[in-house]
Image: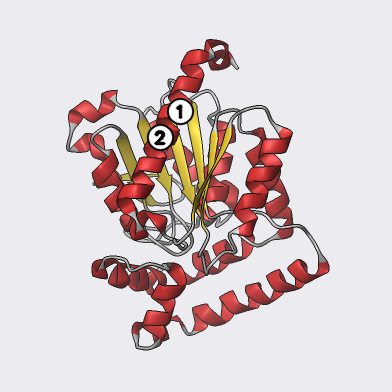
Amino acid sequence: MSYLASERCRLYYEDSAETDPSGKDKPAVLFVNGWAISSRYWKPLVEILSANFRCIIYDQSGTGKTIIKGHKPSFTIQGFADEAAALIEHLGLQKSRNLHIVGHSMGGMVATELCIRYREALVSATIIACGIFEETPMTSLGLFFLGGLIDVSMQFRNIFHSEPLRSIFIKRAATKEIPKEYHDILIDDFTHSDKEATCAVGKFSIDPEALRTYTRHVIQIASPVLCSVGMADNTIPPEGTITLYERRKAETSVPTRLAKFMDLGHLPMLEESVIFAAELKKHFEFSDQFYKKNPQKNAE
């Protein structure tokens, strides 16, 4: 449990190698959070994966224990990628091909930017519930209304502390039952996140130009990519992640894999932690073998 000071913030992070020094010799996994949530929701995965991997979680600006008071961080994809990049370099994770990056929801956009920046260190990328949609008048109209919904939800977000809205909030995020302690964590993170940051993140996540850039960058990732989606996701339509997988599969020869969880929602890391961890581990090991079988890729 540490802080990294920068011009943006005092960034709170946890590195499993701090409590287990042997972790510094293990492959590293950086987890990038979704919208209006702290890093606490990754902990069930970290507990499972830390036996084999060095796991790093952190609170983005505007969430959790990261401190932005006295700073003026930019709440953009580039800005969030900058703070994660500072953490990567602080921990020395950019020095060899030993890094897996996992991004969830909005964090998938930030993770993709990091994958482009650190392509020489990257072993694999995993994108969870962060897709693309065909641009039509109907999808544009839907994104417009969603932007308005973000504004409204931020104005009245404290109502989610009370029933029945509390249960509705949780069920929209997680289709299957999740541990009770995470009900409180999800509500607490959402209602205490920085309002400016949360609104900005919500809106750039649905900005058409940002989505176009994201699509191009996913296709450009030079390491194996896993697209993971809960087919019962009530937060982001799962078809978007499948479309992203199909686009990358069609446009690059670098391995792209799809993991569909038929009865899971937007938070597979909490809904089925063991099963989801096993899928991640399989992808990490597959990607490691990809580089061992194609040593010339290490120079690309």
The quadrant holding residue 142 is bottom right
* Residue 122 in the image, given as x and y percentages of width and height: 49, 28
**Label 2 sits on residue:** 282
- Asked if disc 2 and disc 1 are in contact, CB closer than 8 Å, the reply is yes
How far apart marks 2 and 1 lie (CA) works out to: 6 Å
Q: Is residue 146 above or below residue 299?
A: below
> Is 265 situated left or right of 134 in this image?
left
Q: In the rendered view, how is the structure colored?
A: secondary structure
* Residue 16 in the image, given as x and y percentages of width and height: 25, 39
The residue drawn where x is 53% and y is 55% is 129
At label 2, which amino acid type do we have?
A: Lys
Q: Element type at marker 1?
A: helix
> Is 262 situated left or right of 189 in this image?
right
Q: Element type at marker 2?
A: helix
**Label 1 sits on residue:** 286
Q: Is residue 187 above or below residue 44?
A: below
Numbered disc total: 2
At label 1, which amino acid type do we have?
A: Phe
- The residue lying toward the viewer, choosing from 35 and 69, is 35
* Residue 77 in the image, given as x and y percentages of width and height: 58, 50
The residue drawn where x is 60% and y is 64% is 237
